[in-house]
């Protein structure tokens, strides 16, 4: 297991450690969603997972989300569309997109619209950690 990234925790008044960031995952594939939840928890983050963009947008956890990890290809609303919707609504949440089918058009569109990272599935843990660090420095 990797060492804990420095600076991702706040110390409480009694010297304890408090989780500070909520990572929200929007992924329609249940198995991948569950594996991402386990991975993000292993990095000591609070994590919430949603099977669709609509579920995430309707959630009270939306306002608490420090970083969004979303699948590019989902029914109804894609990860890119979700990011665009959030920005248009004034909710700028650092976003990491993941996909099993990367392509240059989606990559260029995502990065031009401010997405932090565009990762290929299966996600490389080290690359994800770098992306999380980049995303959370924006908070």
Image (cartoon, rainbow, N blue to C red):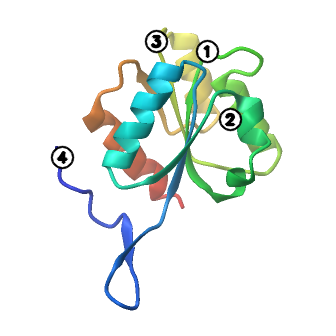
Q: Residues under labels 1 and 2: Cα distance?
A: 13 Å
Image side of residue 2 versus residue 63, left or right: left
Q: Mark 3: few, some, or many residues within 10 Å (few <14, many ≥20)?
A: few
Q: Reply above or below: 118 against 62.
A: above
Q: Residues under labels 4 and 3: Cα distance?
A: 25 Å
Considering only order in the chain, which callout, 2 or 1, is on the residue closer to the N terminus? 1
Q: Is mark 1 on a helix, strand or loop?
A: loop
Image side of residue 18 versus residue 54, left or right: left
Q: Nearer the viewer, residue 27 or 139?
A: 27
Give the labeled residue for mark 1: 73
State yes or no: discs 3 and 1 in contact (Cβ < 8 Å).
Answer: yes
Q: Mark 1: few, some, or many residues within 10 Å (few <14, many ≥20)?
A: some
Please provide percent x and percent y for residue 118. 47, 27
Quadrant holding the N terminus:
top left
Considering only order in the chain, which callout, 3 or 4, is on the residue closer to the N terminus? 4
Considering only order in the chain, which callout, 1 or 4, is on the residue closer to the N terminus? 4
Q: Which residue is drawn at 31% across and 47% down?
A: 42
State yes or no: discs 2 and 3 in contact (Cβ < 8 Å).
Answer: no
Give the labeled residue for mark 2: 83
Image side of residue 107 versus residue 89, left or right: left
Q: What element carries label 2?
A: helix
Q: Residue at x 36, y 90 (%)?
A: 14
Give the labeled residue for mark 4: 2
Considering only order in the chain, which callout, 3 or 2, is on the residue closer to the N terminus? 2
Q: Residues under labels 2 and 3: Cα distance?
A: 18 Å
Q: Which of marks 4 and 2 is in front?
A: 4
Give the labeled residue for mark 3: 100
Q: Residue at x 38, y 51 (%)?
A: 133
Please provide percent x and percent y for residue 8. 36, 63
- Residue 75's image quarter? top right
Q: Reply above or below: 54 against 12.
A: above
Q: Nearer the viewer, residue 41 or 121?
A: 41
């Amino acid at each position: 297991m990797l060492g804990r990234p420095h600076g991702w925790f706040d110390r409480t008044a009694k010297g304890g450690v408090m989780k500070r960031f909520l990572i929200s995952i929007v992924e329609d594939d249940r198995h991948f969603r569950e594996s991402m939840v386990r991975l993000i928890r292993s990095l000591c983050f609070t994590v919430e997972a949603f099977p669709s963009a609509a579920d995430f947008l309707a959630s009270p956890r939306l306002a608490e989300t420090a970083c969004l990890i979303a699948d590019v290809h989902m029914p109804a609303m894609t990860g890119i569309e979700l990011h665009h919707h959030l920005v248009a609504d004034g909710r700028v949440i650092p976003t990491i997109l993941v996909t099993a089918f990367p392509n240059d058009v989606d990559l260029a569109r995502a990065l031009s619209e401010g997405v932090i990272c565009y990762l290929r599935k299966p996600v490389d843990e080290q690359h994800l950690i770098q992306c999380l660090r980049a995303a959370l420095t924006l908070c």
